[in-house]
Amino acid sequence: MAEASRTFHATLLSLPTFSPRFHFKLSYSHSHPSLHLKRARSVQRSISETKTMSLNTTLPWGCDIDSLENAEALQNWLSDSGLPPQKVGINKVEMGKRGLVALKKINRGEKILFVPPSLLISSDSDWSSPVAGHVLKQQNVADLPLLATYLISEANLQKSSRWSNYISSLPREPYSLLHWTRSELDRYLKASQIRLRAIERIADITGTFDDLRRRIFSKHPHLFPKEVFNLVTFRWSFGILLSRLVYLYSMDGKVALVPWADMLNHSCEVETYLNYDKSSQAVVFTTDRAYQPGEQGTNLNDSVELPLSLKISDKCYKQKLKALMKHGLSASQCYPIQISGWPLELMAYAYLTVSPPSMSKQFEEMAAMASNESIIRKDLRYPEIEEKAVQFILDSCESSISKYSKFLKESGSMDLDITSQEQQNRGVFLKQLAVDLCTSEQKILYRAQYKLKRRLRDMRSGELRA
């Protein structure tokens, strides 16, 4: 996907348990402890605020999402600031959006980019308004809200900030899910589990902003004027962060924005590696294959959430539900499916769902593994019910595929609810993003379907041979 689709996809998930492999889709169950968000008291309140503010406010910084002019200015500034000559450059890619493309042939395993640490934006970065930064750190504001506030503070200074060229290259409206109204989410994302994640995300960020406003902003209005530090700008900064932050394992787990590298797009078909390289003392990007001139640089690990549910008709429903609830799970759970496979937790949930009453002593163990809390049996297997568990996952996968197929079929004749040319343009673009997303997620499900069917075939053929 291009930059817009990447941004759209990346802001849905629970605050990430970052991995050194520059994931945009990450863990669904455990948030990084230093990136905690406050839960809003009312999801409906946050959605209604978003609805009234999202279409009527133009930020005084940033650029159009397809602007090459500001992107070229960024590249020039980065070069002047220590970025070495590059084998990639910014150009328009899919849907006319921006991305990094190869300027020269790049070999498999080659290291490129070499962004120096001085160009990283992290919680350690110096504030142009040092008093504001000091106030936030005194209040022990967590990394992500701190970075969100920092980004707004620097953006408001415009040319006075050392990051002005970088911020000018950021999309003014990144089309993240934080900018969608409830009606848009319901209309365009009804086939995807992302819709519920988006509603949760908007509530989380609204709650975080309300907490900062109550504890800090309202008590220091001269440092954090509400004309600048408000829900609109906060939603923008979180949209930028959640789609671009990188976890740099080799820098003691530093979470940072990496200008230039964040122009990379991602793909579920390739594997790449972005991390700090101690030998070159820079953040480098290592590819898994060769790139020809003009080819778009990509990144990995698209995934789709697969919903699984206990069957109410199950004779052991209450007993299984009790085991799940003990470990923070419910009768309905979502787990990530990737092009490369699915997590052990998903398999454990499937085992629990199909297990008969005679296995009631194992319910607790299965539930613990499904929640990723068990450290005892990493090789969890129950051969006597494995075929049923795989079939259960396949049935759930095919049910999701049918929902995507229905949406994609109906999307061609979907009417846009518009009252102006601006809304029409927005509606067309959001619809296209939703179609791209659903197509991408459906491809992952088709791949999972193929693997599951092959696994069942092998299991059944083994039984016949026996």
Image: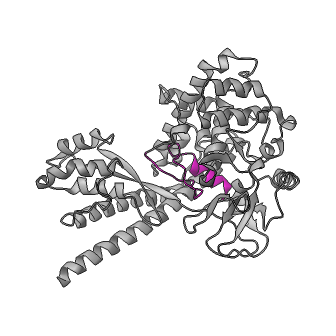
| Residue 110 drawn above or below residue 303 | below
* Residue that appears at 59% across and 39% down: 178
Furthest residue to the front?
A: 279
Please state, as top left, top right, bottom left or bottom right, where the C terminus lies in the image.
bottom left
From the top left corner, tell me how far across and down residue 253 is, in percent: 59, 48
Along the viewing direction, whichever of 46 and 386 lies nearer the viewer: 386
Residue 131 in which image quadrant:
top right
Residue at coordinates 26% horizontally, 61% vertically from top-left?
389
Q: Note whether residue 419 is visible.
A: no
| Magenta range | 1-29
Q: Is residue 303 left or right of residue 287?
A: left
424 sits to left or right of 193: right
The single residue placed furthest to the bottom in the displayed view is: 465
* Magenta residue check for 321: no
Q: Please report the residue visible at 57 percent of the width from the left and 67 percent of the height from the top.
A: 271
| Total numbered circles | 0
Query: Which SS type dominates the magenta stretch?
Result: loop
Estimate the x, y position of residue 284 in percent, counting from the top left.
70, 61
Q: Looking at the figure, which quarter contains the N terminus? A: bottom right
